[in-house]
Image (cartoon, helix red, strand yellow):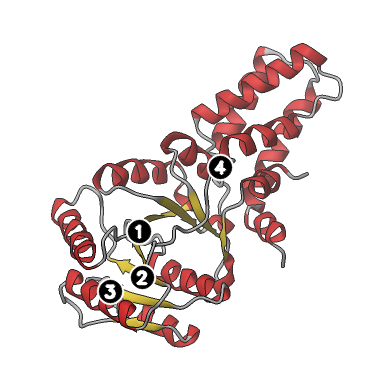
């Protein structure tokens, strides 16, 4: 399945609802009235595109209407173009350390799919013919270590792990040592799920980052926040708060295949200016895909 087909299949619920609503509003009245603008606004907000993006689309629709009238005005094309324009500054490529392994810390609240995402990132790196290691630094959650080890066995990727309750920073330290010794291209660190409001857990994350920074200058080279796409605007609050607590370099949005709230990707990127690096569109290892602004916008408004 090609990338666009994956995007289209993954965003199907969001797309179906959004396109249906816009077409319903437009076919009922080709004239752009205060009522139809209000309905259009409501449809865009319901898809979790956020206030700023909704206002940008509405302004573009009004401008097009004023210059060419309602006949043959393609609302979907206008919305698609605005979203693509807004997202096109997005740089999805993973950063590369100037020398030695590139160390990537995977962070987020509980239940967003960090462990699975870490494994899928390892699969992605392998598909680029590069070498990769995984570090099981979630020493809190029952089964997190086993889960990562299972993925490691499935993908034939080495997993650096310790026992439950072990100091996460010391596991990370061992993992960096191993990544250097094996001359790995990438090391993905699966950290414990934590709420940004839990001060002690945030301190632990800072400690982990400090430890690996001492071993490898500039590390972690990426700090990627994993967000659950099905939580809609709640994910924006998480991203906002996490970004205050830990400087993030990018976002990964998972579980977009089962939600009608796919627009939140646009809202988050628009407000925080953080690049969306990958989006998760299903269960399989290759369902985590590098973000592509053009194909995302197209899939969102494809008829």
Decide which of tag 3 and tag 1 comes sooner along the chain: 3
- Spot occupied by residue 235 in the image (x, y as percentages of width and height): 41, 46
Mark seen at residue 221: 1
In the rendered image, which quarter is residue 37 located in?
top right
Packing grade of label 1 (10 A; few <14, some 14-19, many >=20) is many
The C terminus is located in which quarter?
A: top right
Can you say whether 237 is above or below 208 in the image?
Answer: above
CA distance for labels 3 and 2: 10 Å
In the rendered image, which quarter is residue 177 located in?
bottom left
Can you say whether 183 is above or below 169 in the image?
Answer: below
Pointer 3 residue: 176
Pointer 4 residue: 263
- Spot occupied by residue 245 in the image (x, y as percentages of width and height): 24, 46
Pointer 2 residue: 100
Relative horizontal placement of residue 287, taking residue 112 as reference (left or right):
right
Which label sits in the foreground, 3 or 2?
Answer: 2
């Amino acid at each position: 399945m090609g990338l666009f087909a994956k995007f289209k299949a993954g965003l199907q619920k969001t797309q179906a609802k959004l396109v249906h609503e816009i077409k319903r509003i437009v076919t009922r009245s080709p004239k752009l009235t205060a009522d139809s603008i209000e309905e259009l606004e409501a449809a865009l907000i319901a898809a979790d595109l956020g206030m700023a993006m909704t206002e940008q689309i509405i302004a573009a629709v009004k401008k097009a209407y004023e210059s060419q009238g309602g006949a043959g005005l393609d609302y979907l094309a206008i919305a698609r173009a605005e979203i693509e324009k807004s997202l096109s500054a997005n740089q999805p490529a993973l950063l590369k350390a100037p020398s030695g392994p590139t160390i990537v810390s995977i962070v987020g609240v509980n239940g967003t799919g960090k462990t699975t995402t870490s494994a899928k990132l390892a699969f992605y790196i392998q598909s680029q013919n590069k070498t990769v290691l995984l570090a099981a630094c979630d020493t809190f959650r029952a089964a997190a270590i086993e889960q990562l080890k299972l993925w490691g066995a499935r993908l034939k990727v080495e997993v650096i792990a310790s026992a439950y309750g072990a100091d996460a920073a010391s596991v990370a330290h061992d993992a960096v040592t191993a990544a250097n010794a094996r001359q790995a291209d990438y090391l993905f660190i699966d950290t414990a799920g934590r709420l940004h409001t839990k001060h002690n857990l945030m301190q632990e994350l800072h400690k982990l980052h400090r430890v690996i920074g001492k071993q490898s200058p500039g590390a972690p080279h990426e700090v990627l926040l994993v967000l659950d796409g099905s939580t809609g605007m709640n994910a924006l609050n998480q991203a906002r708060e996490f970004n205050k607590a830990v400087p993030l370099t990018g976002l990964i949005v998972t579980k977009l295949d089962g939600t009608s709230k796919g627009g939140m990707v646009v809202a988050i990127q628009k407000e925080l200016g953080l690049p969306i690096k990958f989006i998760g569109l299903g269960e399989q290892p290759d369902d985590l895909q590098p973000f592509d602004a053009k194909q995302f916008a197209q899939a969102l408004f494809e008829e």
